[in-house]
Image (spheres, helix red, strand yellow):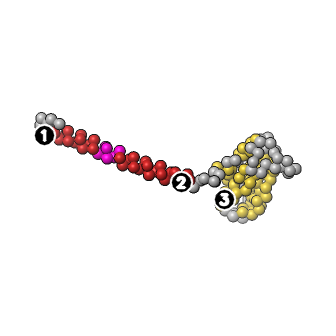
Amino acid sequence: MSPMDASTMTAQMSQLNMVSSMGTMNTSMQSMLAQMQSANFLNQATLIGHSPMVAGNTINFMGSEVILGANLANPLQGVVATIKDASGNVVGTADLGNLNSGMTNFAFDGIDASGATMPNGIYRVEITGKNSAGANEMPTAYVGSP
């Protein structure tokens, strides 16, 4: 630092102060990042042993049981899950009965009405039931990863 006048000295001191502040901010940001990564790892650890469920009706059947879900906004009566193949043909149904609002899980085992295992491929699930007024409702379907 070689100030010639007071304004130059003030400007140089301001620049040094800014550099020092940026270093402190960098240290704080690195600390925040480390804390966020740690929290993220803890959140991910709670998912071990669980299968994620995704809203949708497409099932990618690969020969093993797939967990499905129905998320009901209202209680429904006579809830039925219908499984259709890629051509739209009904290949199976599951009577889920009367359900309260919220999430209900059930399984698609890939066994058709004759007891044979269905071929691997894409299937679709449609879930329907009747509300308290007797009107049909289609709750949101969820599909788990195989």
Residue 17 sits in quarter: top left
Rounded to the nearest angstrom, the CA distance separating label 1 from label 3 is 71 Å
Is 120 left or right of 26, judged from the image as shown? right
Q: Measured from the top left, where is residue 30 in percent x and y?
A: 39, 46
Residue closest to the far left = 5
Residue drawn at x 68%, y 50% is 143
Label 1 SS: helix
Could you tell me how far apart the alpha carbons at marks 3 and 2 are, in whole angstroms?
A: 22 Å
Q: Residues within 10 Å of mark 2 (few under 14, many from 20)?
A: few
Residue at left offset 69%, top offset 64%: 100
Q: Label for residue 103? A: 3
Residue type, mark 3 in image:
Met
Q: Is residue 133 visible from the viewing direction of this image?
A: no
Q: Secondary structure at mark 3?
A: strand
Residue pictured at 87% horizontal, 50% vertical: 114
Q: Secondary structure at mark 2?
A: helix
- From the image, state whether disc 2 or disc 1 is nearer to you: 2
Image height of 23 relative to 45, above or below: above
Percent coordinates x, y for residue 50 in the rendering? 63, 54
Q: Quadrant of the N terminus?
A: top left
The residue beneath circle 1 is 6
Structural crowding at the residue carrying mark 3, measured as other residues with C-alpha within 10 Å and reported as few (<14), some (14–19) or many (≥20): some
Residue interval drawn in magenta: 21-26
Q: Is residue 131 magenta?
A: no
Identify the amino acid type marked 1: Ala
**Marks 2 and 1, how far apart at CA:** 55 Å
> Mark 2 — residue?
43
Disc nearer the start of the sequence (1/3) = 1
Residue type at mark 2? Asn
94 or 73, which lies in front?
94
